[in-house]
Image: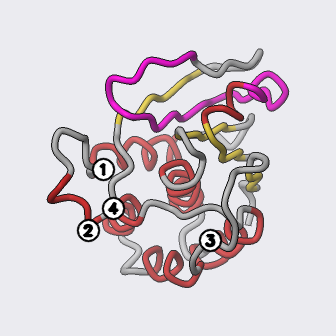
Amino acid sequence: MIFVTSYWIAIERAADIDPRFIISLMDPGSTYSLPRGPSLERHIHIAVNDIAPGEVQYAEPHVVPNADHVGQIVEFARTWDGQGRVLVHCMGGVSRSSAAGLILLAARHPGREAHIARLLRQRGPWVNPNSMMVRLADGLLGCNRALVTALAQMGEPTMRGVLEPVELPDHW
């Protein structure tokens, strides 16, 4: 099971979720307490700002998502044995973390991009996956725009505010 949420909910609920792995997508240079759980084996920290394609020209001094950032998610997806829970969070639980959840599952289940995106939208009406990260993943995974199309078909968020972690299964 994959849980996608905000930093604040991750801190509050990590012990209950009891993740084996945590993927944190936080602003570079930020200091924060690490979410923990009794079964935690590995914490992947990806230092990247939440920047969309139209904002790149104004990004400095922020860190724009790139293939190395997305590659860390893809590499984890390809090496994860599917056992244990994965907690994915960014600061707000809306953009970077939802993109990472979408990418993680798309890497594990090629050809299921549209189904994964629909479930992500259904369970997280507030999510708005970072389109730059998704576009980079589409290229890295060789999806031939299937992941980009799935993101577009999700449509805009229908509500604001993160209520609970979005729970996504790792079986399709």
Q: Which residue is mark 3?
A: 157
The quarter holding residue 143 reads: bottom left
- Foreground mark, 1 or 2, reads 2
The quarter holding residue 123 reads: bottom right
Q: Which residue is mark 4?
A: 52
Question: Are circles 4 and 2 on residues that touch, CB within 8 Å?
Answer: yes
Mark 1 residue crowding within 10 angstroms, few (<14) / some (14–19) / many (20+):
many
Q: CA distance from mark 1 to mark 4?
A: 9 Å
Span colored in magenta: 12-33
Mark 4 residue crowding within 10 angstroms, few (<14) / some (14–19) / many (20+):
some
Depth check: 170 or 97 in front?
97
**Percent position of residue 81, x then y:** 64, 40
Q: Which residue is mark 2?
A: 54
* Dot 1 or dot 4, earlier in sequence: 4
Residue found 45% across the figure and 45% down from its top = 73
Residue found 78% across the figure and 29% down from its top = 13
The quarter holding residue 68 reads: top left
The image's mark for residue 95 is none
Question: Are circles 1 and 3 on residues that touch, CB within 8 Å?
Answer: no
Q: Which residue is mark 1?
A: 65
Residue at disc 3, secondary structure: loop
